[in-house]
Image (tube, rainbow, N blue to C red):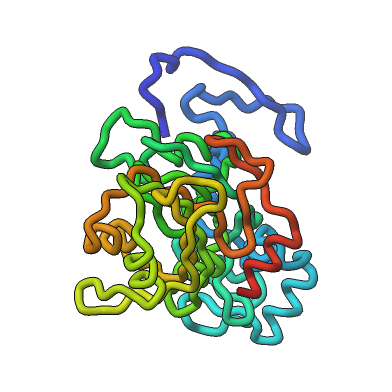
Amino acid sequence: MSRNDNSSGNKFSGRQGGGGRKKSYARGNAPIKPKKVTAIEKQEDGMRLNKYIANAGICSRRDADIYISSGNVSVNGAIVTEMGYKVKLTDDVKFDGRSISPDKPEYFVLNKSKGVFVTGSVHKGGLTVMDIMAKASKSKLDPVGKLDTQTTGLLVFTNDGSLAKKLANPKNGIRQIYHIKINHALSQEDLEKIREGVFIEGKKVNVTDVSYVKDRPKSEVGLELTSTRPHIIQKMFKSLGYEIVNLDRVVFGGLTKKDLPRGRFRTLTKQEIINLGNL
């Protein structure tokens, strides 16, 4: 098949196997080298299931084949035992019932600064946590839960979908401690109201503990709770006639801000990952 590259007059010759005669080709009829397949095209064709599992850090490809044949792996809800089966990045692959990703699982914690957006879709040009975490990994990291733009403190990031879903599930009750500064001193009466549980939008907010911050003005309070309801702390104090000036999450699960400066992130240790998985 001739290509329109204005090369119809050019010739090159090649030797036929088994004879001395030379066979001439018009350049447009020359054998075409196989097209180099890009990484994106390979992904579109699919990734072998055993490689997908190995990339997820579960085991080696050889061991993955054993698990596949034993029925430990499902794709989009169906058990797959076929060797060489290919999956796409959009498929839901589960190993022993747990969703996995072909990217090696990564785990980070960020000490978020005030004024940094968790999402930047509405506020064009504003710094987002994703801008900061882009320096941490090439993988797609997602924040576990959310913090308001003006709220500071601990925010976990991972590409481990199963752990992220577990930590974000309100039923699991992840321990959180906040350091709160309000616009004037919190009365002892209101402190007791918070401890007993304030009703917000018809539902009681159960607080694990609340107290004044030691050696600080009574406008600074420490609050421990497990609720993940949006803006629940702001709503609780507002219902009692207070305005929050600063809200800082100092503990999340077993993680603390110790040795982690504001605006910086770090990789979680193996023990911290285990601890989060056991919550």
Residue at x 48% of width, y 73% of height: 208
Q: Nearer the viewer, residue 268 or 91?
A: 268
Picture quarter containing residue 33? Answer: top right
Picture layout, residue 271 above or below residue 127: below
Picture layout, residue 151 above or below residue 166: above
Q: Nearer the viewer, residue 96 or 120?
A: 120
Picture layout, residue 31 above or below residue 193: above
Picture layout, residue 114 above or below residue 253: above
Residue at far front of view: 188
Q: Relative to residue 188, is residue 159 drawn left or right?
A: right
Residue at x 63% of width, y 27% of height: 23
Q: Position of residue 80 (x, y in %)?
A: 58, 81
Q: Position of residue 72 (x, y in %)?
A: 65, 83
Q: Quadrant of the C terminus?
A: bottom right
Q: Position of residue 121 (x, y in %)?
A: 28, 41
Q: Relative to residue 149, is residue 215 drawn left or right?
A: right
Q: Position of residue 92 (x, y in %)?
A: 48, 70
Q: Quadrant of the N terminus?
A: top left
